Amino acid sequence: MARDAFRTGVHSLDRALGGGIPPGSLAVALGDAASAVELLGYRTAVATDLDTRYLTTMRTPATVRAAIGDAASAGRTLGDLGPARAETVDIRQVGVAGESADVFHPSLGEHDAVVVDSFRDILATDGWRDAFTAVRDHVRERDGLALLVLDADPDGALDRPVRQVCRAADAVFEYRADRATEDTLTARKVRGLATEVPVLPVTVSLEVGRTLHHDPDRGHQ
């Protein structure tokens, strides 16, 4: 039996996508260092209802678990996902500095969902392509979901590895923080959506939970 789309936990985005991200997808979330792009990773880890492994290169498991719990109970802006679900996420800290990304492959385990924060650190290793392929093949074989969180300004000049990852990914999301108005999340591309879903890209507000606009003219180089 085919799986339904996986929720991201950002309800306005899930509605805009007709339910969420299609099974077997590898998604990338882009956001500059000043944004809270990791929020999508935290919410997705809880919302999918899959056995989820969260791999972090930059935070301790205790810090990530607390952040996932906070994100799961975001209240009126994003909706309560149930903070108790955060306790079921398998969180592992992986070291990649100066190493081959080969260390990354055994960390995938038997989980159907994988979140990596931050994949920018993996890109700094010689073996990032192998790591990317390992994650992509893992979730496709399991009909699961992977989300790679990347510290990169979606409005800036993306370096070559980031562009390559975005081209190869099944879905690309862009997080923008704007203190003057509201944070937004744009679905730039999502492969395998139902035909009745509006043409992408589509932008949603993270403050009031509504669709803001469609902008079909912008895209990754």
Image (spheres, grey):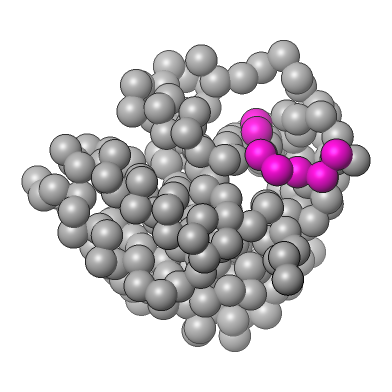
Residue 28 drawn at (x, y percent): 51, 42
Nearest the viewer among 64 and 100 is 100
Q: Is residue 187 magenta?
A: no
Nearest the viewer among 199 and 59 is 199
Q: Residue at x 47, y 33 (%)?
A: 168
- Residue 39 appears in the rendering: no
- Residue 3 appears in the rendering: yes
Residue 104, placed above or below residue 155 = below
Tell which residue pokes out farthest to the left in this image: 98
Q: Residue at x 59, y 85 (%)?
A: 84
Q: Is residue 55 left or right of residue 67?
A: left
Tell which residue pokes out farthest to the right in this image: 196
Residue 14, placed above or below residue 53 = above
Dominant secondary structure of the residues highlighted in magenta in the image: loop
Q: Residue at x 35, y 21 (%)?
A: 159
Residue 56 drawn at (x, y percent): 33, 61
Residue 60 drawn at (x, y percent): 30, 69
Nearest the viewer among 138 and 118 is 138
| Magenta extent | 188-195
Q: Quadrant of residue 123?
A: top left
Q: How many marks?
A: 0
Residue 53 drawn at (x, y percent): 43, 70
Q: Is residue 173 left or right of residue 204?
A: left
Q: Is residue 208 left or right of residue 127?
A: right
Q: Is residue 152 left or right of residue 51?
A: left
Q: Residue at x 63, y 68 (%)?
A: 48
Q: Quadrant of the N terminus?
A: bottom right
